[in-house]
Image: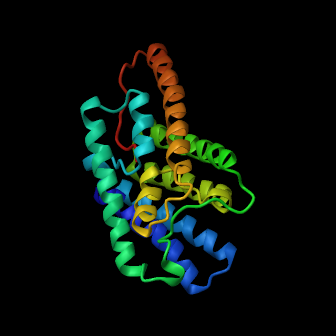
């Protein structure tokens, strides 16, 4: 819950701050991507050893599909992720939601000219690669610093590439908290369906590769540290 709260508070909060500061579109994109990437990396470093740094419901879905998450933990993770997102949305509303540029609380929305189908497709692609990076870090990278760098860096790059088109959610909790508390739920289904499909697809592929790797190497279990 704490990890998801930090991501949803600082990430969308950076979108609001950039608009209030009057940054250019390029400056805003770099600033927001850096805040999201650094927040995820920091959560992995600080909380990963305690909870696995599950701060994204979509990646939890991907992890479960890949066989790297105990079934009894799945629903509790989702519940606390949603709780953290709602708490962050409430804090953003208290801090920025009086009106004006901060009224939408950094909610995700499609750029002009992007259709809902295109938006879902882009969210699928982005979440697919983010999930693969997280599962790879969890299973094959031992150093927490390298795990944080891999996942945070992947998110940073994906936001640079896809952010101008969809807002680069890749995380249902990140979209849900700000949108619900701002009252702007239009088009939000895109940011729930796309990431879940993308993460589940990555989980299926990763699970199959993991099984093949285990059979060839004689290893039946991989080290799972972080699946943020």
Q: Residue at x 32, y 45 (%)?
A: 78
| Residue closer to the observer: 70 or 124 | 124
Whether residue 46 can be seen here:
no
Q: Is residue 159 above or below residue 203?
A: below
The quadrant in which residue 97 appears is bottom left
Q: Residue at x 37, y 80 (%)?
A: 95
Q: Residue furthest right?
A: 113
Residue 172: give x, y in percent of width and height. 46, 50
State the quadrant of the N terminus.
bottom left
| Residue closer to the observer: 191 or 68 | 191
| Residue closer to the observer: 206 or 72 | 72
Q: Residue at x 49, y 65 (%)?
A: 184
Residue 112: give x, y in percent of width and height. 72, 63
Q: How many marks?
A: 0
Q: Is residue 162 above or below residue 23?
A: above
Residue 61: give x, y in percent of width and height. 42, 37
Whether residue 220 can be seen here:
yes
**Left or right for 218, reference 15:** left
The quadrant in which residue 165 appears is bottom right
Which color scheme did the rendering employ for the protein?
A: rainbow
Residue 77: give x, y in percent of width and height. 29, 44
Q: Residue at x 25, y 49 (%)?
A: 50
């Amino acid at each position: 819950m704490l990890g998801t709260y930090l991501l949803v508070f600082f990430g969308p909060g950076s979108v609001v701050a950039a608009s209030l500061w009057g940054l250019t579109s390029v400056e805003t994109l770099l600033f927001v991507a850096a805040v999201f990437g650094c927040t995820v990396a920091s959560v992995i470093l600080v909380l990963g050893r305690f909870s696995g740094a599950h701060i994204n419901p979509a990646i939890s879905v991907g992890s479960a599909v890949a066989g790297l998450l105990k079934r009894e933990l799945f629903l509790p993770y989702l519940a606390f992720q949603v709780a953290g997102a709602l708490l962050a949305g409430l804090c953003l509303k208290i801090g920025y939601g009086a009106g004006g540029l901060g009224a939408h609380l950094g909610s995700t929305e499609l750029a002009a000219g992007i259709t809902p189908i295109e938006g879902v497709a882009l969210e699928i692609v982005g979440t697919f690669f983010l999930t693969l990076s997280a599962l790879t870090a969890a299973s094959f990278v031992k150093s927490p610093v390298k795990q944080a760098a891999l996942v945070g860096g992947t998110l940073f790059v994906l936001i640079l590439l896809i952010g101008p088109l969809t807002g680069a959610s890749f995380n249902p909790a990140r979209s849900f908290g700000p949108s619900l508390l701002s009252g702007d739920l239009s088009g939000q289904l895109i940011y729930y369906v796309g990431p879940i499909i993308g993460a589940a697809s990555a989980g299926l592929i990763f699970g199959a590769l993991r099984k093949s790797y285990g059979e060839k190497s004689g290893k039946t279990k991989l080290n799972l540290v972080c699946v943020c």
